[in-house]
Amino acid sequence: MMFEETDFEIPLEKQLRLRIINEEIDACTDIEALRENLKQCVKSLQTYQHLLNETLKKQLQHNRNQLQDKILKEINIIIDGNKSSS
């Protein structure tokens, strides 16, 4: 599954929230607060990337297991069909 161009478009309500956050950052003069918030943002980003990777890995394993089960059932049907026609 590939992403579509529209998947990268941020919805209007999120664009508004982003604009408000950007304005708050631009108005902030407390360098220490900016540093701490940046560190929290990086940690959140890393956590979300890890969670997404784990979710995708588990989903792929699940899909693989389902496909494997389906293939084995089809093979058994073919084998059983060949045995009964012999």
Image: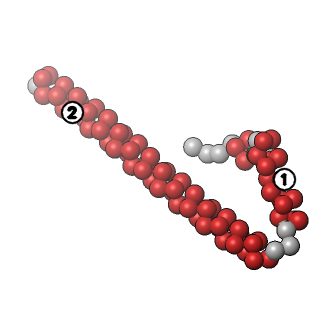
Asked if 46 appears above or below 51 in the picture, the reply is: below
Q: Colour scheme used in the picture?
A: secondary structure
Circle 1: is it few (<14), some (14-19), or many (20+) Cα within 10 Å? few
Q: Residue at x 41, y 42 (%)?
A: 63
- In the visual, does 55 lie left or right of 41? left
Residue at 44% across, 46% down:
59
Q: Disc count in the image? A: 2
Q: Give above or below for 69 relative to 24.
A: above
Quadrant showing the N terminus: top right
Q: Where is residue 9 in the image (x, y as percent from the top left)?
A: 76, 45
Residue type at the position of mark 2: Asn
Which residue occupies the foreground of this view, 77 or 8?
8
Distance between mark 2 and mark 1 Cα atoms: 59 Å
Residue 58 placed where, x, y %?
A: 42, 50
Circle on res. 19: 1
Name the residue at the bottom extreme: 32
Q: Quadrant of residue 70 in the image?
A: top left
Q: Mark 2 points at which residue?
A: 76
For badge 1, the amino acid type reads Arg
x and y, in percent, of residue 37 in the image: 71, 68
